[in-house]
Amino acid sequence: MVRKILRIIGTLVGIVAGLYTFVSLRPLVAEYIDITEGMHFTPVNIGYYIIGALLFGLIFYLLTPVFINTFNRILSWADVKLKAVPTQDIALVVISLIITLVIGLLLSYPIYRIPVVGVFISPVLTLLLVFIGVRFVLNRKEEFTFISGLFNRNARSGGRENEVFKILDTSAIIDGRIVDICKTGFLEGVLVVSGFVLEELRHIADSPDLLKRNRGRRGLDVLNKIQKEMDIPVQIYEGDFDDIPEVDSKLVRLAKTINGKIVTNDFNLNKVCELQGISVLNINELANAVKPVVLPGEEMVAQIIKDGKEAGQGVAYLDDGTMVVVEGGRRYIGETIEVLVTSVLQTAAGRMIFAKPKQDAEKYSSGVK
């Protein structure tokens, strides 16, 4: 319906344009066609103006759909480009434009009064100041978080402290444990997934290597599950940092820009964030922290599944993945036995428990007695 109305309006505009054009061309046409002087409604004049109106009306009638389609494509293109620009950046640009325009007008006013050259120098100076001001603000936007924070969802919702942005990196998404953490309700605030992390996941999912492809697809499935099944809000950050090639460095810049915390299990990214003063939520550290505490002398049940590195050792695993090295446990491979904890070793990779079969410990104790 709207397109029909616009087409009718376009046709009417064409008719008016045709009349105006043919009136303007009347003196030239009068040399070849017998048109009387003045705007008299003679049969010749009326026919002349009708031809012009109908001709331009037909042209505009045919061209109006082309104009409408072109205008829609321009709007769609502009909409996509503007969506990729963070709201914080738009706010900073608008504020810097207003400030630099005022400064430029104040400085260029005396120059404007210079005869001849002042008219040309004044606008050039104003535009130059605007360009420098906007560039300065955008290059240091992480230092203006006190302004951009006003446009965050957190600030608009009342500035509640628990609504902190948690930025997911690629390793945390592919790992998949973030879903279970969200289910427990311990993770609060807004989960942020950046566009460049999504792009990296897409590249991994399209990899010719089967293992990488499966990891990438699992990451995309994890994100889809978080968005559809979890109560925690998820926000897609469409902005990008074109001057930074590495994804990890982009995540660090994003954390500084929105004052967020990075959720990861990447050891190197964790260290970089610590050096730059960025808060990190490490999933591996969380997993180690919630593992049950085992003290020397306690008893537990373990299934010996394979040989250890040293002679006679057997290896078992607890439900949480903790490795249990059983001295003299090789002969019990495939069996579920009671073991006695002798020591616990905490490493960067996790916790390792050393134990020995309870039967052997009891025999040793009896022999000593």
Image (cartoon, rainbow, N blue to C red):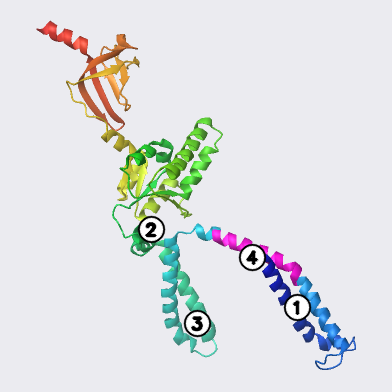
Can you tell which of label 1 and label 2 is closer to the viewer?
1
Q: Which residue carries the number 2 mark?
A: 153
Tag on residue 15?
1
1 vs 3, front mark: 1
Q: CA distance from mark 1 to mark 2?
A: 51 Å
Give the x, y percent position of residue 219. Answer: 46, 38
Which residue is labeled 4 in the image?
71
Which mark is first along the chain, 4 or 3? Answer: 4
Q: Which residues are magenta?
A: 60-79
Mark closer to the observer (3, 4): 4
Q: Residue at x 36, y 47 (%)?
A: 262
Q: Secondary structure at mark 4?
A: helix
Front residue of 125 and 208: 208
Amino acid type of the residue tagged 1 in the rendering: Ile
Q: Is residue 273 magenta?
A: no
The picture places residue 288, in percent across and down from the top left corner, at: 28, 33
In the rendered structure, the answer to whether residue 206 lies left or right of residue 244 reads right
Tag 2 or tag 4, which sits nearer the N-term? Answer: 4
Amino acid type of the residue that numbered disc 3 sits on in the rendered structure: Ser
Q: Is residue 68 magenta?
A: yes
Contact between labelled residues 4 and 3, with CB atoms less than 8 Å apart: no
- Is tag 1's residue or tag 4's residue first in the polypeptide sequence? 1
Q: Amino acid at mark 2?
A: Arg
